Amino acid sequence: MRHRTRHVLGIAFDYHMRADLVTNAIQTMTFEGPGSIWHSDQGKQYGAEQTRQLLLRKGFVLSMSRAGTPTNNSFAERFVGQFKFSVAQRRPYHTLGDFLRAAEQWINFYNQERPHEGLDQLSPQQYAQLHGLEQVSPLSLL
């Protein structure tokens, strides 16, 4: 039996990786979560009480990878690796604003235009349109 999965991106940037950064990203997500699974690695920011409580209030089922097992979260690991290669390591950025503009452009390309092998060479937006799924608006970081 094949389960329909949907991956949604909430994003926040700062010069630290604390729980409030994660909760800020969760607050940017525009869909309701009841019954959705929130899967993360074992970072302290994901296991923090404020993060867990916010996710539970939004109706998420919490899931966490086993320690030292990035394969438990392969979609996120691949996405982050692709993001780092395509944006973060591509060139030096002189300001956080420069970086955020590049990140916004790439994420919108990734969601709106980039063909995905797992979606029969459609972008996530094209796949959602074809299958009558909720479509995600382009991301605006600034």
Image (spheres, rainbow, N blue to C red):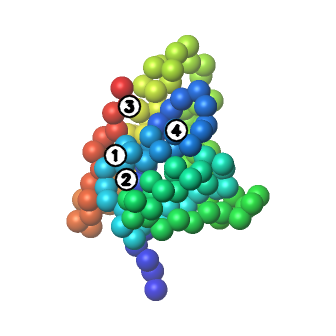
For the C terminus, give its image quadrant: top left
Residue 107 in the image: above or below residue 34: above
In the rendered structure, are the residues bearing label 3 and label 1 in contact, judged by CB atoms less than 8 Å apart? no
Secondary structure of the residue carrying numbered label 3: loop
Residue 141 is marked as: 3
State the residue at coordinates (61%, 46%): 45
First in residue order: circle 4 vs circle 3: 4
Label 3 neighbour load within 10 Å: few <14, some 14-19, many 20+: few
Label 2 neighbour load within 10 Å: few <14, some 14-19, many 20+: many
Q: Which residue is at the front of the view, 29 or 85?
A: 29
Indicate which label's residue lies in the foreground, 3 or 1: 3
Give the amino acid type for the residue marked by disc 1 in the picture. Answer: Gln
Q: Position of residue 23 (x, y in %)?
A: 47, 45
Secondary structure of the residue carrying numbered label 4: helix
Mark 4 to mark 1 CA distance (whole Å): 25 Å
Q: Position of residue 97 (x, y in %)?
A: 46, 20
First in residue order: circle 3 vs circle 1: 1
First in residue order: circle 2 vs circle 1: 1
Mark 2 to mark 3 CA distance (whole Å): 21 Å
Residue 123 is marked as: 2
For the question of whether residue 75 can be seen, the reply is no
Q: Which residue is disc 4 drawn over?
A: 21
Label 4 neighbour load within 10 Å: few <14, some 14-19, many 20+: some
State the residue at coordinates (39%, 71%): 35
* Left or right: 101 in relation to 48: left
Indicate which label's residue lies in the foreground, 4 or 1: 4
Give the amino acid type for the residue marked by disc 3 in the picture. Answer: Leu
Give the amino acid type for the residue marked by disc 2 in the picture. Answer: Ser
Residue 99 in the image: above or below residue 77: above
In the rendered structure, are the residues bearing label 2 and label 1 in contact, judged by CB atoms less than 8 Å apart? yes
Mark 2 to mark 4 CA distance (whole Å): 28 Å
First in residue order: circle 2 vs circle 3: 2
